Image (spheres, rainbow, N blue to C red):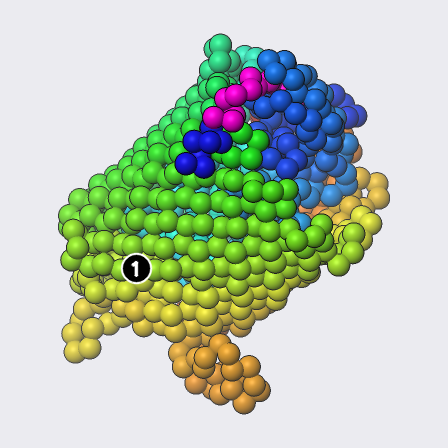
């Protein structure tokens, strides 16, 4: 009834249009990706590649604001009359620090970063463009608190290594989950790295809004939007790997090279914005069976606001043919596979569809509908097996955003997800997840923001053979202690339902026989955080203290009295730690950043989280052991110099020696010391850049018997025609 009344009121008056551009104040260049919002309403949009935007707005007086990483916000007051079109130009001035003013992922709506009660990091368009990475996971290594091992991503020691079965961090692409329906993992090769506009990383339990897989955090990727005038772009990357330091590791006399070629086009066709890009990647690999050939296609269509509604549809397709490297032949031949595995290969194909409609019923009410499908196929061509799997994850979401008053808003929604799998390794299975959620945000004063939310999930496996229900609450608060100091705190529950692969794998892997365990229970977690953000002139300092309690973590275990292995809920764990981030703008075109994470990851006999005494803490250390594959210390730093049109940047990352591993505990383990160097020159219409990864040719492993990438050099040309 309330919705119908609001609809009637909204239609009673003819709306107007607010159009304009967001430009760089000093150069006049457009600023694509800038967030444009109307203060006190649910109305907002993003500037396209030419910096243009369009909003359909009910009559009234509003304050329009444009924000973008690396720029100071710009605001203007506008008056919208019925049927009128008002044009504005918002010019943003650069600031020495690349700070993200607005994020979307933490609350499923745009909100200032200073009001987000949980640690959040953002990679902007320039960060991604300048690094020119082959895949997104290469860039995520330089996000504080994020770890990658063998392609598996974790946040603050949430993940060890499980050979790709189940991710505790949810990946979203333009709002739609990009988690496979069979293994529950992430395919980094399927992401259109060349078309990524922005990446947001939320650190901490996100199940209160996103459900399963968001137990430890959420990573959201935003792709490029169509432009208003015809634009064609080209990106070419060519590079090669250096020779290994040790002569006995030099298994090939050939130069091991790689390349990427991407072409794209974007334009407007009436009220439609269209974008298309195609990419081809190939690499010889730095080790035997490390070669790959990849193809990617992406298409996007956007419909401009019409009768208060806007819509978009995005389609991705990707395929990969690659060699399979499980472990080295020996430490003396660390870049070769064992005899008999030389021809092992994996072929995979992925299709992803994502469509959404947003309807601005009025300045204080918006409705949102999304439908998505993610289809994956893979087949192994191994000496001893040719397993294969087809999976389809399909879902829909309906969400409403209500601005009840200027300081109080409510977001509600429901979601339905279906996973269908047909596999020689997992069998044929169907999983359903039905969920409803609500979140309220209240600003009792200009200095305080309170957030509370709750989500209910119900999972059904194989038409009712297994039924699980989860309730995930959250609470957060931010307090502005002074104009330059923000205090935040949050607590939330997370969970992860077992994937089809974890429940039903029935195969032989690397000499082990793995059998199903359909009785697996969901993993559960509670996450706590207190943080302080200080802005001091040219520097920003962010300090966070956090703790995560885990129950029923799923790990592979030997079946007593047999040579069999199966996945089981065996681990009770606790991770405590601190994280420090510093960003500073320096004289003469220099800027720098530092991120340090300290972790105490333990598993075993963990006392209740409410016992904080010294005796309990000492007993916990005595009765527990280190979580495997988690370094206690991580440090990332960067030093950047820019004097247009030139740029030069050095990055360093350190990870302490892992105290415990599971597969080969007697193998030698070393800390990580990795230096990367990049630079380039940017001219009107084109950019030429270079990148040297692992500059010092430091050899190390992230997972036993898997040597990490050796030194490589790449040169990239990006041009707009």
Which residue position is annotated with label 1? 469
Magenta run includes residue 155: no
Residue for point 70% across, 38% down:
70
Q: Nearer the viewer, residue 252 or 110?
A: 110
Residue 543 visible here: yes
**Horizontal arrangement in the rendering, residue 82 relative to residue 512 (left or right):** right
Residue 151 lies, in percent from the top left, at 42, 50
Residue for point 27% across, 60% down:
468
**Horizontal arrangement in the rendering, residue 339 relative to residue 141 (left or right):** left
Q: Nearer the viewer, residue 424 or 302?
A: 302
Residue 11 lies, in percent from the top left, at 50, 22
Q: What segment carries the magenta color?
A: 8-21
Residue for point 39% across, 29% down:
355
Magenta run includes residue 19: yes
Q: Secondary structure under badge 1?
A: strand
Q: Nearer the viewer, residue 105 or 2?
A: 2
Residue 673 visible here: no
Looking at the rendered image, the quarter that the N terminus falls into is: top left
């Amino acid at each position: 009834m309330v919705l119908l009344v609001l609809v009637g009121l909204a239609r009673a008056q003819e709306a107007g249009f607010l159009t304009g551009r967001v430009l760089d104040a000093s150069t006049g260049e457009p600023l694509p990706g800038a967030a444009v919002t109307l203060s006190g309403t649910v109305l907002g949009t993003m500037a396209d590649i030419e910096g243009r935007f369009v909003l359909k707005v009910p009559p009234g007086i509003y304050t329009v604001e444009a924000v973008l990483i690396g720029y100071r916000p710009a605001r203007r007051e506008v008056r919208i009359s019925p049927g009128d079109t008002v044009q504005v130009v918002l010019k943003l001035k650069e600031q020495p620090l690349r700070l993200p003013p607005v994020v979307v992922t933490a609350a499923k709506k745009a909100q200032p970063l200073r009001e987000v009660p949980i640690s959040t990091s953002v990679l902007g368009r320039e960060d991604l463009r300048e690094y020119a990475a082959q895949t997104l996971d290469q860039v995520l290594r330089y996000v504080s608190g994020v770890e990658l091992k063998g392609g598996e991503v974790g946040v603050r020691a949430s993940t060890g290594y499980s050979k790709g079965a189940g991710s505790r961090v949810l990946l979203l692409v333009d709002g739609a989950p990009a988690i496979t329906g069979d293994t529950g993992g992430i395919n980094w090769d399927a992401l259109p790295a060349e078309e990524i506009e922005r990446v947001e990383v939320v650190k901490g339990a996100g199940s209160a809004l996103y459900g399963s897989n968001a137990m430890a955090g959420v990573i959201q990727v935003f792709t490029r939007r169509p432009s208003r005038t015809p634009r064609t772009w080209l990106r070419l990357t060519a590079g090669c790997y250096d020779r290994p330091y040790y002569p006995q590791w030099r298994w090939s006399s050939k130069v091991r090279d790689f390349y990427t070629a991407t072409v794209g086009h974007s334009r407007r066709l009436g009220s439609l914005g269209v974008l298309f890009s195609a990419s081809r990647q190939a690499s010889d690999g730095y080790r035997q069976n490390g070669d790959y050939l990849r193809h990617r296609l992406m298409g996007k269509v956007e419909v401009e606001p019409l009768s208060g509604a806007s819509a978009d549809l995005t389609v991705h397709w990707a395929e990969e043919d690659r060699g399979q490297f499980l472990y080295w032949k020996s430490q003396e031949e660390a870049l070769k596979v064992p005899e008999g595995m030389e021809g092992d290969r994996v072929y995979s194909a992925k299709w992803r569809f994502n469509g959404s409609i947003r309807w601005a019923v009025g300045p204080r009410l918006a409705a949102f509908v999304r439908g998505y499908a993610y289809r994956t196929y893979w087949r192994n061509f191994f000496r001893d097996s040719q397993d294969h799997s087809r999976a389809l994850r399909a879902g829909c979401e309906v969400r409403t955003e209500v601005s009840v008053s200027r300081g109080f808003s409510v977001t509600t929604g429901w979601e339905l997800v279906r996973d269908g799998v047909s596999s020689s390794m997992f069998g044929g299975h169907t999983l359903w997840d039905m969920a409803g959620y609500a979140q309220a945000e209240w600003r009792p004063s200009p200095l305080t923001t309170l957030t509370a939310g709750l989500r209910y999930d119900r999972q059904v496996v194989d038409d009712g053979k297994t039924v699980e229900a989860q309730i995930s609450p959250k609470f957060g608060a931010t307090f502005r202690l002074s104009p330059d100091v923000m205090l935040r705190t949050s607590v939330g529950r997370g969970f992860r339902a077992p994937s089809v692969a974890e429940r039903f794998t029935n195969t032989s892997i690397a000499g082990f026989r793995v059998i199903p365990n359909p009785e697996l229970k969901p993993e559960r977690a509670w996450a706590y955080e207190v943080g302080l953000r200080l802005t001091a002139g040219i520097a920003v300092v962010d300090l966070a203290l956090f703790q995560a309690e885990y129950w029923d973590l799923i790990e592979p275990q030997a079946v007593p009295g047999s040579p069999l292995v199966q996945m089981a809920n065996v681990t009770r764990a606790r991770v405590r730690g601190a994280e420090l981030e510093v960003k500073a703008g320096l004289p003469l075109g220099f800027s720098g950043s530092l991120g340090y994470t300290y972790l105490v990851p333990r598993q075993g006999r963990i006392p209740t989280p409410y016992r904080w005494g010294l005796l309990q803490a000492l007993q916990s250390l005595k009765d527990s052991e280190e979580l495997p594959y988690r370094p206690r210390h991580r440090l990332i730093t960067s030093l950047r110099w820019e004097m247009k049109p030139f740029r030069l940047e050095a990055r360093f990352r350190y990870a302490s020696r892992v105290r415990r591993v599971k597969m080969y505990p007697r193998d030698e383990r070393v800390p990580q010391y990795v230096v990367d160097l990049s630079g380039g020159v940017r001219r009107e219409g084109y950019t030429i850049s270079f990148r040297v990864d692992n500059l010092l040719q430091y050899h190390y492993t992230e997972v036993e018997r898997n040597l990490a990438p050796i030194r490589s050099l790449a040169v990239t040309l990006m041009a707009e025609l």
